[in-house]
């Protein structure tokens, strides 16, 4: 029953640290490789580099919610939403290009 999940390549769930600047501060984020792959795909789909996408996501989350208490969790749930079909509207993509 779980073979498709249990037999996956262990490199997919290996923890990977990436260093980047968020809100002007250097930080390191640790996620499993599968999440980094998805975040790279999401960023590319929006015409951004992954660091730029993460910075924009952080800034927008702070603007909407006032704070981001657990950014790694926000990134994981962003991946889940993306896999469930959540995508920016055409107007949002057009605003990005402007």
Image (cartoon, rainbow, N blue to C red):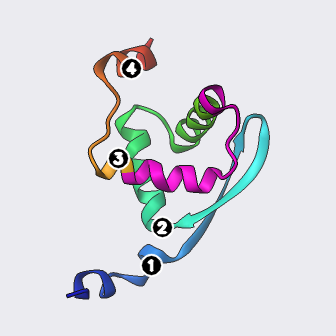
16 or 2, nearer to the observer: 2
| Viewer-closest of 1 and 3 | 1
Q: Position of residue 79 (x, y in %)?
A: 41, 52
Closer to the chain start, of discs 2 and 4, is: 2
- Judged by depth in the image, the label closer to the viewer, 3 or 1, is 3
Q: Secondary structure at mark 2?
A: helix
Question: Which residue appears at 32% of the width and 35% of the height?
Answer: 87
In magenta, the rendered stretch is 62-80
The disc label shown at residue 61, or none: none
- Label 4: element kind: helix
Q: Residue at x 26, y 44 (%)?
A: 85
Residue 4 versus residue 75 in the image, above or below: below
Q: Position of residue 18 (x, y in %)?
A: 63, 58
- Our reading of the magenta stretch's main secondary structure is helix
Cβ atoms at labels 2 and 4 below 8 Å apart: no
Mark 2 or 3, closer to the camera = 3
Which dot marks residue 82?
3
The residue carrying pointer 4 sits among few (fewer than 14), some (14 to 19) or many (20 or more) residues within 10 Å by Cα, namely few
**Marks 2 and 4, Cα distance to the nearest angstrom?**
28 Å
Is 16 on the left-hand or right-hand side of 97? right
Query: Label 2, on which residue?
Result: 33
Mark closest to the chain's N terminus, 1 or 2: 1
Dot 2: within a 10 Å radius of its alpha carbon, few (fewer than 14), some, or many (20 or more) residues? Answer: some
Disc on the earlier residue, 2 or 3 = 2
């Amino acid at each position: 029953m779980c073979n498709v999940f249990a037999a996956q390549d262990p490199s997919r769930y290996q923890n990977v640290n990436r260093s980047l600047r968020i809100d002007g501060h250097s930080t390191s984020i640790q996620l499993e490789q599968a999440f980094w792959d998805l975040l790279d795909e999401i960023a590319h789909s929006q015409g951004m580099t992954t660091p730029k996408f993460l910075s924009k996501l952080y800034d927008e989350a702070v603007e909407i919610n006032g704070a981001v208490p657990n950014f790694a969790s926000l990134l994981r749930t962003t991946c889940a939403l993306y896999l469930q079909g959540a995508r920016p509207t055409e107007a949002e993509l057009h605003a990005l290009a402007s």
